[in-house]
Amino acid sequence: MDLGAGRRGVDMGPSAMRVAGLNEKIASLGYEVEDLGNIVVDQPENSPMGPENARYIGQIAHTCQRLAHMVEQAADGGRVPLVLGGDHSVAMGTAGGMAAHFRKRGEKIGLIWIDAHADMNTPESSPSGNVHGMPLAAIVGLGARELTHLLGFSPMVEPANVAIVGLRSVDEIERQNVRGAGVHAFTMRDIDERGLRSVMQEAIDLATRSTAGFHLSFDMDAVDPQEAPGVGTPVRGGITYREAHLAMETICDCGQMWSMEVVEVNPVIDEVNRTALLAVELIMSAMGKRIL
């Protein structure tokens, strides 16, 4: 899906990750892999754009509902959902499905959001009207009801159990949403001053406080564009190659990640599939691959 993005191309991200050998490499770690294929998504060429401040919101909500039901069903069956994006608006479907799964058990899910952007705009605050800048707001209950109540309840995740890591690009009005919602944001300055290990440990602590575990949402633009050039919205000054792997290894070590998504891989502006290859490497680290 690239309906939520301002630049075309991230709809090809899942294919690029498959071409990079994702399924085979996960299987090499000892997992049983079932690839459910791509979810059918309306194309912008033959879809009404809808409101200027939330383009394609109806189509995005419909797709995320379908994704949420597939994720919930997979989790109900004891599997670990791995969602490939696509623009970051797919996170509403993944988080919603996992929240619904744990809700049936009387439990909550936390969320670690690794991203250069907060994605906490609402239709009222968004300068672009691109919905991929709104999913985290919707997940914690802010914004348009079509997005906040995808599965009939809100919030999908309590703001106190949300940690944003790698933040370095926030819109002016969006900044108020981040500060006021109660989520915990770790900027690149925090990583520079404290080191990624310390930041990740606190993020895990926050996401697992009074929860059953957490969902990991990884936007490839969190990584510096020198290492990940093919992303939807690149921003200079991101986490390094080794920091990205350390984040994934730390998450794997804690043993409390129940689902994961990797989004915003854009092969159209990538260099010989470098970004998709890195995405696969990071997934492998999150799933247990080690140097020794």
Image (cartoon, grey):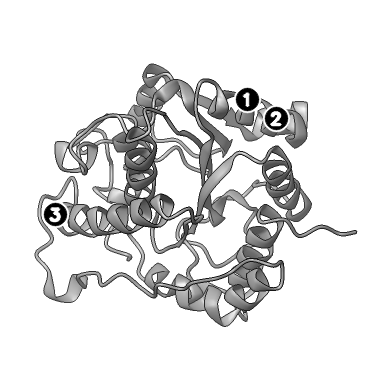
Residue 70: where, in percent of width, then height? 32, 59
Residue 157: where, in percent of width, then height? 38, 31
Label 2 close to label 3 by CB (< 8 Å)? no
Residue 62: where, in percent of width, then height? 18, 57
Amino acid carrying mark 3 in the image: Gly
254 displayed left or right of 32: right
Q: Quadrant of residue 186?
A: top right
Label 1 close to label 2 by CB (< 8 Å)? yes
First along the sequence among labels 2 and 3: 3
Quadrant housing the N terminus: bottom left
Q: Kindly state the secondary structure of the residue where label 1 is placed.
A: helix
Amino acid carrying mark 2 in the image: Gln
Which residue in the protein does label 1 denote? 205
Dot 2 surroundings within 10 Å: few (below 14), some, or many (20 or more)?
some
First along the sequence among labels 1 and 3: 3
Which residue in the protein does label 3 denote? 58
Residue 34: where, in percent of width, then height? 49, 72
Whether 287 is drawn above or below 206: the answer is: below
Whether 32 is drawn above or below 164: the answer is: below
Dot 1 surroundings within 10 Å: few (below 14), some, or many (20 or more)?
some
Q: Residue furthest right?
A: 292
Dot 3 surroundings within 10 Å: few (below 14), some, or many (20 or more)?
some
Whether 35 is drawn above or below 121: the answer is: below
Residue 89, can we see it?
no
Amino acid carrying mark 1 in the image: Asp
Front residue of 151/123: it is 151
> CA gap, disc 2 to disc 3?
37 Å
Front residue of 5/58: it is 58
Which residue in the protein does label 2 denote? 201
